[in-house]
Image (cartoon, coloured by chain):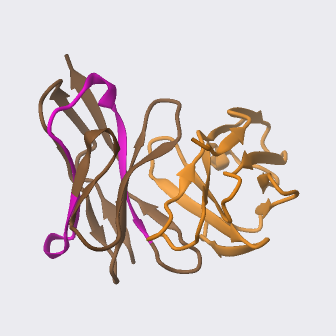
Chain colours: A orange, B brown
Amino acid sequence: EPEVTQTPSHQVTQMGQEVILRCVPISNHLYFYWYRQILGQKVEFLVSFYNNEISEKSEIFDDQFSVERPDGSNFTLKIRSTKLEDSAMYFCASSEDGQASNQPQHFGDGTRLSIL
Amino acid sequence: AQSVTQPDIHITVSEGASLELRCNYSYGATPYLFWYVQSPGQGLQLLLKYFSGDTLVQGIKGFEAEFKRSQSSFNLRKPSVHWSDAAEYFCAVGHNNAGNMLTFGGGTRLMVKP
């Protein structure tokens, strides 16, 4: 069964540095998402992306964050000038269709980001 | 605002016993509801979804869930739990808009006693 893959599985970065988290969505999927889960807290929506632009973003997704689909397969989340509170598990997801009723979101295994 | 509540943070059941995990939602329109499972070190795997029609939905691994609009609930059930079911379970509501975001509950950690 096709999977969403995320790299790296664990990223350790110094505070203030930039980090890029990478995702390869399922190949025929058109909608892409990033979520995060701070340790002990809920999974939170960050952003959704379709047709090379952001469809929706949460209040968490401020100017520090950006997303990009640099080629036909990768979907990246960049965090500029990381802060301690950015430490979390970041999940990428993709769906065939943007309508939740028709096509569910498939999640990767996540990247654990640790900011020192 | 939309929200999802899973009242039980931890549940322990004996192997072979039945299971019910509770989920309550708050959403202004017809909800699209999901249950995901997360095993340690893994991502979120979809167990089942509800969007319309029969209020009792069947999922993978022998799970089912029942949508009760009057109670704003979407409880997950399994008649006989296996040790491999030990994991964290998340209920989520989908927003039928351009962004298609999911709002998750806080999760219920299931432990299975031999």
Numbered disc total: 0
Splitting the image into 4 quarters, where does residue B5 fall? bottom left
* Residue appearing at x 84%, y 48% in the figure: A18
In the rendered image, the residue lying farthest to the top is B114
Asked whether A28 or A10 is in front, the reply is A28
> Magenta stretch: residue B84 in it?
yes
Q: From the top left corner, tell me how far across and down residue A48 is, in percent.
A: 64, 67
Question: On screen, A31 above or below B88?
Answer: below
In the rendered image, the residue lying farthest to the right is A70
Is A14 placed left or right of B58 in the picture?
right
Is B22 placed left or right of B101 in the picture?
left
Asked whether A94 or A9 is in front, the reply is A94
* Residue appearing at x 28%, y 43% in the figure: B9
In the rendered image, the residue lying farthest to the bottom is B29
Question: On screen, B107 above or below B87?
Answer: below
Splitting the image into 4 quarters, where does residue A17 fall? top right
Q: From the top left corner, tell me how far across and down residue B97 is, in percent.
A: 52, 80
**What span is in magenta?**
B66-94
* Residue appearing at x 87%, y 58% in the figure: A70
* Residue appearing at x 44%, y 71% in the figure: A101
Q: Quadrant of the C terminus of chain A?
A: top right
Q: Quadrant of the N terminus of chain A?
A: top right
Q: From the top left corner, tell me how far across and down residue B113 is, in percent.
A: 20, 20
> Magenta stretch: residue A79 in it?
no
Question: On screen, A28 above or below B39?
Answer: below
Q: From the top left corner, tell me how far across and down residue B14 is, in percent.
A: 15, 25
Splitting the image into 4 quarters, where does residue B57 fall? bottom left
